[in-house]
Structures are given as structure tokens and as C-alpha cells.
Amino acid sequence: MALRLIQHLRSPEFQHVAIVLTDRPQDRSADFEKVDGLARYTCPLDTGHRAAFVRNMGQLLSSIKPDCVLAYNFGNHAWVAMAAHRAGVPRTLVRVAGSPTRDWRTRWRSTILAHLARPFCAGEIAVSHTVARELTHGLGLPRRRVAVIPNGCDVEQIEREVAAARGLAGRSSGWRILMVSRMDDAKDHGTLLRAVERLRRASRQLRLTLVGDGPLRAENERLATSLGIRDAVEFLGNRSDVSAHMAQATVVVHATHTEGMPNVLLEAMAAGVPIVASDIPPVREVLDDGRCGLLVRPRDAVKMADAIERVHDPDVAGPFVDAALRRVRAEYSISECVGRYAALLDGAVVEGE
């Protein structure tokens, strides 16, 4: 989202500088190097030496002299905000993308860091109304501090990429089930794998493509093998050609335990692919209470298999796809998102002055 904001919010009034908090080769810092004219810095965050980080970041910000700092790392934003205050930056804001109360450990840590940051951070930007409620009701932050700006989706670009990919390859035979997600304990690949196993036992010709990597990849591969469906499952790891896989998918599944706001659902809505997803609050919010995709009780492989089968009926899928495209264009376009950020950041700079 930082990259999208930088690319789409460029004008004499808004000039961007990117500070990446890690220099590890597996991070996305290289993506910022591709943006023409973007000043980019690195300030590694060593959680064991936070005082040194605050000092180093403060020195860096003193040399840059920004009007506003927008932090993308809720929790660690406390140290960024302290550094910005030390450097005399008028205003710091933090974007909150994930669930800050997903479990008791996360809630405990988030509460401490959120309130530690309050004297130095002007406010929080929640990516969904669900996250906003977690910040106010779960962490006890005042409502006046929290703005809601959903993630933006470049609908037209995705439509072009998907159309081009379909034109080159065409649709494959059989069902093509796609899930795009990091493989960690926040997501529920296990339920999807068990649903696929049920569909295979019902003699459905299908292939499951899993895009994404993470600490649970090996466990998911073992589960696919134990279920006897390993030959029908592709583990592709991290990919930059998600639109090409959307173009081949007959359904996108998002099985998850917790979310802030699922970007992949916005991309699937723009791509015109039917959706089956776990029925949790932020997913329900994006899918408009089930008007834009089938919602399934979490951890229920039977219901998930049934839903996947249902959306392969064009009469069922068609209204969902049409409603999803209308909604993503109206509510989650990149222009709408950028406009909200522009208004907020412009106000932040004026008030800071």
C-alpha cells in the first residue's frame, strides 16, 4: 500500500521519501528502488536496541525534515513516533493493517505499544471498520484518533492484466481453485485442503494453486500428502504474477482465522472471479455481508467444499461477480483510497504547522 500511495499520490503538494526499517534481502525494499525519483533510506530496526534505533531514526528524520511521517508498522510505530518527535516532525500517523487483538498476546502487546505511542503519534489509520473497532473497543484508544481508509485496488490495471492473461492462455479444463496468502497461523490452508480432499472423493476434476510462502508451508505440504491430494496441489511460493493466476482461476478461496483487510479479495473482485471466504468480520465487511461472495463458517471443510461446488454454477456465481465488481469500483478503487489519504495528510500537515 505504501508503494501504491507513492505511485498514485505524486504532485508538487506531496513529495515522498521512503524509509525501510530493514536491510534484509527478503524484504520488499528493492521495490521502492524501481520508483523514479523516490528518495529511499534504510534504518534497520533491532528490537534489542530500541534506544539506538530511536536515536538513529531521529537523526535521519532531522536531516530529511518531513512535514508528516506515515508509519506502516503498527506496534513498532511507537519507536518511529518517538524518533519523529525527537526530530521535530509536526505529525506522525500510523496505518493499522492487521488485527491488533487477534489473540491475547497480540492484544496485550498492542495495548502497551499503542498507549506508549499516544504522546508522540497523532492518530491511527485503520484499513477497515473492523480494525477501527478493535483499536477503540479492544485497545481503548479514543475514537477521535482513528480514521478508516480501506486499502485501494487498481481495478482497471487488474482488469487489463487478467484480460491479457486470459487472451494468451485461455481457461484450463477442470476447476482451478486459487488461494493467495501467507502461510502462517493467521490463515487456514488446512480447511481448504480438507475441502479439496472431499471434492476429489466426489470425483471432481480440479487443481488447487496456493500462492504464498511462510512458516507453515512445510506443514501444509505434509497435510496435502497425508490427504492423498498432493498431485492436485501446486505450492508456488511468493509470486509477482498473481493476476495471471486469477485469470486461470474458476474460484478464489480465502480461508482465514483473522484479518485486517484482505487485499486478495479486492483483486479477485476486480478480476471477476467468484469468491468463497471464511465468515469473519473484516471479510464480511469487504464482501458486503455475503452479497459479493459466498461466506463459510470458519474451520468447516464440509461447508467450504459445498460452497466451492456451488459457485461453479454460473447462475449462482454470476450475481456475486457482478455485485463484487460494482462494489470494488465504488468503494475500494485506488483513486478513492488516495483521495482519502491526501485529505488526511494535507490536514495533518496544516494542523502540525
Image (cartoon, rainbow, N blue to C red):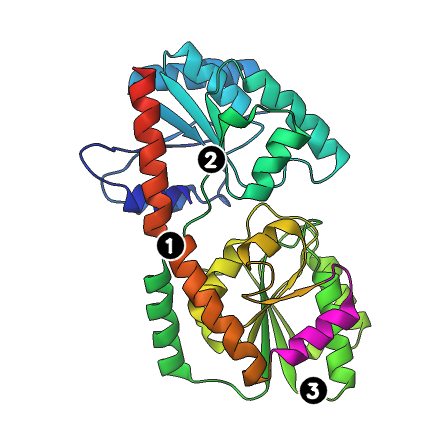
Q: Quadrant of residue 293?
A: bottom right
Q: In the image, is residue 295 above or below residue 140?
A: below
Secondary structure of the residue carrying tag 1 is loop
Q: CA distance from mark 3 to mark 1?
A: 36 Å
Residue at 43% from the left image edge and 10% from the top image edge: 86
Mark 2 is surrounded, within 10 Å at the Cα level, by few (under 14), some (14 to 19) or many (20 or more) other residues, namely: some
Q: Is residue 28 magenta?
A: no
| Residue type highlighted by circle 2 | Asp
Q: Nearer the viewer, mark 3 or mark 1?
A: 1
Residue at 46% from the left image edge and 13% from the top image edge: 55
Is 274 displayed left or right of 91 in the figure?
right
| Residue type highlighted by circle 1 | Ser
Q: Earlier in the sequence, mark 1 or mark 2?
A: 2
Magenta-highlighted stretch: main secondary structure?
Answer: helix
| Quadrant of the image containing the C terminus | top left
Q: Position of residue 224 (x, y in %)?
A: 75, 70
Marks 3,1: beta carbons within 8 A: no
Q: Position of residue 337 (x, y in %)?
A: 38, 46
Question: What residue range appears in magenta?
Answer: 297-311
| Residue type highlighted by circle 3 | Arg
The dot on residue 333 is 1
Q: In the image, is residue 254 above or below residue 99?
A: below
Is 75 displayed left or right of 255 in the figure?
left
**Mark 3 — residue?**
204
Q: In the image, is residue 93 above or below residue 120?
A: below
